[in-house]
């Protein structure tokens, strides 16, 4: 089990990474904007602390926290968001499609719910080959009404695949409240397929870790999938576009109430002040290095736009539309 300081380090890294990224969106260094993960850091930190280095995760459009918690290099991750050739995916993945297979990140995915099928397939293959590796798929409350997620739940249960389904229920599918979009209960969807399901306080990294450890142990022992609904709150915008557009789907008072339990403060209170100060300084140094790295890194060559497009190395025909 990760100790309190390591959990704090992961939560702090994600928080400060996202804050740096938001500033780089504002300055134009990161094009197109991002979906900030601020407020939900306990889930990525707690779940990924329960995993081995060779375990697998799939992620979402709001995926920076998952990728960082699983061990990807924050320097190259920031370069990826900025579309640089030195990024994790040579600038081709960007904010919503970052991947790092070397640390078990089989990709963020901008299609709501779609990554669940990838994780379930990866988990099934581990079982077929006799491996005890486990897969985790993260998704939001908006995904629970997507057919692909329900199909993945069905197959995971049928095949007893070693996969953990993690629903980050922040109360909104973009701007639509769960109460307006979702009949029944979210854990009930998994239970309908015979999958054990639990609702967890998604603001407390240690509670998330404890639930994830139990689920991962079940999967590794061959006892099949588990579903965790982690109740959380998104402190910032659905997308940085909101910083300019200012949509009015929640009030300032509601945001203040929802943000009152901060995972950074919850976990920070468990770590001695001098240890927190050291961790904070180390993270600032890494992120300052990351910003310098981004500034010194080249954009991809437009002539290489079709590189890596096909698995067999084929390129599109010149002049083809």
Image (cartoon, rainbow, N blue to C red):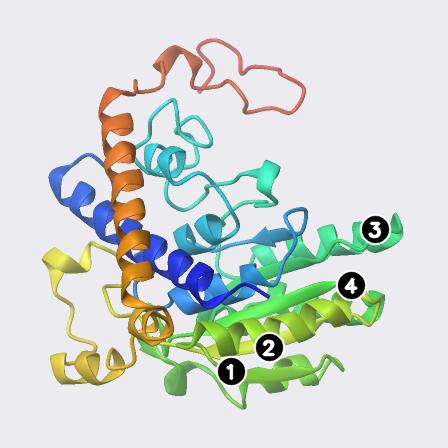
Q: Secondary structure at mark 3?
A: loop
Q: Is residue 241 above or below residue 266?
A: above
Structural crowding at the residue carrying mark 3, measured as other residues with C-alpha within 10 Å and reported as few (<14), some (14–19) or many (≥20):
few
Choose the circle earlier in sequence order: 2 or 4: 2
Q: Are marks 2 and 4 in contact (CB under 8 Å)?
A: no
User: Label 3: which residue?
Assistant: 131
Give the quadrant of residue 40: bottom left
Q: Earlier in the sequence, mark 3 or mark 1?
A: 3
| Label 1: element kind | strand
Q: Is residue 288 visible?
A: yes
Q: Quadrant of residue 115?
A: bottom right
**In the current view of this chain or complex, which residue is farthest to the bottom?**
184
Residue 74 in the figure: left or right of residue 89: left
* Mark 4 in CB contact with mark 1 (< 8 angstroms): no
Rate crowding at label 2 as few (under 14), some (14 to 19) or many (20 or more) other CA atoms within 10 Å: many
Q: Which residue is mark 1?
A: 200
Q: CA distance from mark 2 to mark 4?
A: 14 Å
Q: Of the two numbered discs 2 and 1 on the same chain, state the one appearing first in sequence.
A: 1
Tell me which residue sits at (41%, 57%) in the image: 10
Residue 97 place in picture, x, y as percent: 46, 43
Side of 79 where 252 appears, left or right:
left
Q: Any mark on residue 220, and which?
A: 4
Considering depth in this image, is 84 or 303 the residue closer to the camera? 84
Q: Residue at x 54, y 45 (%)?
A: 107
Marks 3/2: CA distance?
22 Å
Rate crowding at label 4 as few (under 14), some (14 to 19) or many (20 or more) other CA atoms within 10 Å.
some
What mark, if any, has residue 211 been given in the picture? 2
Compared with 52, 227 (above or below) is: below
User: In this rendering, would 153 be left or right of 176?
Assistant: right
Q: Where residue 72 sits in the image (x, y, percent)? A: 48, 42
Per the model, the C-alpha gap separating discs 2 and 1 is: 7 Å
């Amino acid at each position: 089990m990760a100790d309190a300081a390591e959990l704090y380090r992961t939560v702090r890294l994600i928080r400060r990474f996202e804050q740096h990224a938001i500033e780089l969106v504002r300055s134009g260094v990161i094009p197109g904007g991002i979906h900030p993960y601020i407020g939900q850091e306990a889930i990525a930190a707690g779940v990924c602390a329960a995993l081995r280095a060779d375990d697998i995760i799939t992620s979402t459009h709001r995926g920076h926290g998952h990728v960082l918690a699983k061990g990807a290099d924050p320097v190259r991750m920031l370069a990826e968001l900025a579309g640089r050739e030195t990024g994790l995916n040579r600038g081709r993945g960007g904010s919503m499609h970052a991947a790092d297979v070397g640390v078990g990140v089989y990709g963020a995915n901008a299609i709501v719910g779609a990554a669940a099928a990838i994780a379930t397939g990866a988990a099934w293959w581990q079982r077929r080959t006799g491996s005890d590796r486990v897969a985790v798929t993260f998704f939001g409350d908006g995904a629970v009404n997507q057919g692909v997620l329900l199909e993945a739940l069905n197959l995971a249960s049928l095949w007893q695949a070693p996969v953990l389904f993690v629903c980050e229920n922040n109360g909104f599918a973009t701007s639509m409240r769960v109460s307006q979009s979702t009949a029944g209960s979210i854990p009930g969807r998994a239970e309908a397929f015979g999958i054990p399901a639990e609702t967890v306080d998604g603001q407390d990294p240690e509670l998330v870790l404890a639930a994830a450890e139990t689920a991962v142990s079940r999967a590794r022992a061959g006892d099949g999938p588990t579903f965790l609904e982690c109740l959380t709150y998104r402190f910032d915008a659905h997308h940085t576009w909101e910083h300019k557009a200012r949509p009015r789907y929640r009030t300032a008072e509601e945001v203040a109430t929802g943000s009152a339990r901060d995972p950074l403060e919850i976990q920070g209170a468990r770590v001695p002040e001098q240890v927190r100060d050291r961790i904070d300084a180390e993270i600032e140094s890494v992120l300052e290095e990351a910003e310098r790295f981004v500034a010194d890194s080249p954009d991809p060559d437009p002539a290489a736009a079709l590189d890596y497009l096909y698995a067999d190395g084929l390129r599109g025909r010149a002049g083809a539309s």
